[in-house]
Amino acid sequence: MKGFDVSSICVQDPPLFDGQPFRAPDYECISFNADKVRVWTYVSLRVLVDISFGVVPRDHNILYLRISAKEGSLLGNDRSLRIINAYNRPAEGGHTVTGKGLFTETHEPTLVVGDLNVHTAYTDPMRNLKPGERRKGAHYIRLPALRGYTIINTPGIYTRFPDNPTLHRPTVIAYTLANNSLLAKVSKFKNVYQR
């Protein structure tokens, strides 16, 4: 991460080293204390000087992080920002995270980042979707749109690269969505590639 000006990094389904998250110099690793950590969020120490944060405990597949300015405002007139980091594991014919749990209606600027493990024609236009994939993906696109969230991934930019490219093709299963309160205050988002 040397040479980058990154305030936070969201990681889903993280690898562990001796049962612990990877250490990143100049970053604080925030996660739940659980048997199997599903999501971590690293926050830059230079940013932590000016903010406070609170973790809202709900589910080990979702990390709700509320970041607040210690003094003044954080974004425009807003003193806080929510980052929701999720890992939506496939489980028993469905997924471990529901769209209702992720995309809450709020006027607080909110960024949802996650490995949603769903496919959509919008973000992966070259993928030939099966009917079941299309239905699951549509749910995770329609609900956020109804609640004021916009996908900010660049369509066609892959977020997952297979271990064996002869058997599987790259795909888009990780998404970044911002609600209207955040979109109005941030002019530029950059893609960060996963895995």
Image (tube, rainbow, N blue to C red):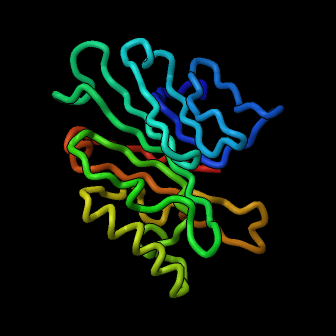
User: Does the image show residue 1?
Assistant: yes
- Residue placed furthest toward the left: 77
- Eyeballing the image, is 118 above or below 105? below
Q: Position of residue 114 (x, y in %)?
A: 50, 52
Q: Nearer the viewer, residue 188 or 89?
A: 89
The image quarter containing residue 140 is bottom left
- In the picture, which quadrant includes the N terminus? top right
The image quarter containing residue 15 is top right
Left or right side of 54 for 32: right
Q: Residue at x 31, y 14 (%)?
A: 70
- Eyeballing the image, is 182 above or below 81? below
Left or right side of 66 for 25: right
Q: Position of residue 159 (x, y in %)?
A: 56, 57
- Residue placed furthest toward the bottom: 131
Q: Residue at x 24, y 25 (%)?
A: 79
The image quarter containing residue 130 is bottom right
Q: Nearer the viewer, residue 14 or 187?
A: 14
Q: Residue at x 27, y 40 (%)?
A: 109
